[in-house]
Each structure stands twice: as structure tokens, then as C-alpha cells.
Amino acid sequence: MLKRLQRELDRLLEVFGLQHWAVVLVTDDFEGVSAPGRLPQLGHVKRSSDALWAEIRIATKGRSESEIRDTLAHEVAHLLLADLDDLFKDAVGKLGGQAESVLEDVWVRCEEQAVTRIVRVIGGFRSGD
């Protein structure tokens, strides 16, 4: 399955115009983690926009390959928004205090909604279905 996911990652990077990023894909045999009041986190991307490097970590335990591929697409879409995310965080970081906390929460919700919509749009272009 890892080879198929790597091919899907390469395809998604091309679709999003992110082929210049070096992305490491890690699959973990866990069900995901959740914070109080939030859905389980089934994937995570750690990145450096300056270095054009990212690590995508995806939960695999008890999930179908289709669900895992959906999570992969979701995390790659976060890379698409990386520059915008960095600009926002830099600007909000200058505010400090409670404003920073409130705006960060709003940003996370907006970014997740945008990523979900992007993935929905490219859903019709998925390989292997």
C-alpha cells in the first residue's frame, strides 16, 4: 500500500503544482488523536516553506485505502496554502495576547474548510478509482 500512496502523493503534488517540494510520507498504525471537542486527527503535515520540505504523517489503523488517500489529499492541500498560512501567522503573531489566540482559532477553522473544499474539487481527478 505504501508504494500506491507514494504514487498518489507524487500525482497530487503535480496536480497542485507542488512538485518542487520534498515530501516524506509516513504511515502510522494508529487510529488518530483528538483534542477535547475536536474530531480525531487522522493526518498531520509538518513543513518548512522556506526549505520546501514537508513530512506527512497518516493514521492507517482500521481505515480503508480510500480513506487514507483522502487524508493524504487533505494534507497535501495544506501545503498548497502554506504561504498564506505563514503570512497569516506572521501577522497575527505581532498582535500577541488574546487577539492572537482568537484569530488563530478562526484561522484554523477557515483553513480546514478551505482544504476540505479543495479536496472535494479535485476528488473527480483521483487516480485509481
Image: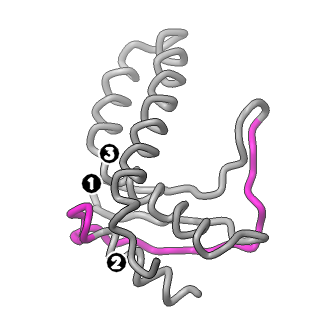
Which labelled disc corresponds to residue 10?
A: 2
Residue 33: x percent and y percent? 75, 51
- Viewer-nearest residue: 68 or 87: 68
Q: Is residue 123 magenta?
A: no
Q: CA distance from mark 3 to mark 1?
A: 14 Å
Q: CA distance from mark 1 to mark 2?
A: 20 Å
- 86 shown above or below 101: below
Q: Which residue is mark 3?
A: 81
Q: Could you say whether the residue bearing mark 2 is in a helix, strand or loop?
A: helix
Looking at numbered disc 1 in the image, what kind of residue is underneath it? Asp
- 102 shown above or below 46: above
Looking at numbered disc 3 in the image, what kind of residue is underneath it? Leu
Q: Is residue 20 magenta?
A: yes
74 to the left or right of 13 = right
Residue 124: quadrant of the picture: bottom left
Residue 47: x percent and y percent? 41, 56
Residue 13: quadrant of the picture: bottom left
Q: Which residue is mark 1?
A: 50
Residue at 50 percent across and 74 percent down: it is 25
Highlighted range, magenta:
14-35
Marks 3 and 2, the one that precedes in the sequence = 2
Residue neighbourhood size for the residue with mark 1, other residues' Cα within 10 Å, grouped as few (<14), some (14–19), many (≥20)? few
Residue at 39 percent across and 77 percent down: it is 127
Residue 58: x percent and y percent? 61, 66
Marks 1 and 2, the one that precedes in the sequence = 2
